[in-house]
Image (cartoon, grey):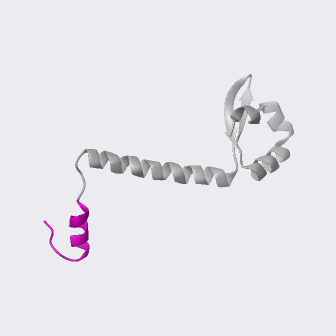
Amino acid sequence: MKFSTQVKPISYLKSHAADIVKTISENREPMVITQNGEAKLVVMDVRSYEEQEETLALLKILALGHREIEQGQFRSATEVLATLDGEDAQ
């Protein structure tokens, strides 16, 4: 996706809101809105936003897990499986 094809001034947003909603909902590409030549907003459909938030949440979980591994805060798979089997693996 190229943002350069989806850059519009705020005046366009004001006068074409219904068209923008239809276009963004159909093609699921965000639109950058500028004010005085400077990027100010990104307008996107709800489905894309939700998917982006879910992806971000998963990336945060992965980063947290990676950090815990680097700090030695983990158990081996053998220990976990033994615990699940009801054995005392410690």
Residue 78 in the magenta stretch? The answer is: yes
Residue 32 in the magenta stretch? The answer is: no
Q: Check the image and report above or below for 49 versus 76.
A: above
Q: Residue furthest top?
A: 36
Which residue is painted at 27% across and 44% down in the image? Answer: 70
Q: Which residue lies furthest to the bottom in this view?
A: 86
Q: Where is residue 20? Give x, y as percent.
A: 80, 44
* Picture quadrant of residue 80: bottom left
Quarter that holds the N terminus? top right
Q: Residue furthest left?
A: 90
Q: Where is residue 88? Give x, y as percent.
A: 15, 72
Q: Where is residue 5? Give x, y as percent.
A: 76, 34
In-front residue for pair 59/42: 59
- Could you tell me how many numbered marks the image carries? 0
Span shown in magenta: 76-90
Q: Left or right? Give the position of 21 relative to 47.
A: right
* Picture quadrant of residue 35: top right
Q: Left or right? Give the position of 22 relative to 47.
A: right
Which residue is painted at 34% across and 51% down in the image? Answer: 65
Q: Left or right? Give the position of 65 relative to 71.
A: right
Quarter that holds the C terminus? bottom left
In-front residue for pair 11/50: 50
Which residue is painted at 69% across and 35% down in the image? Answer: 3
In-front residue for pair 53/81: 81
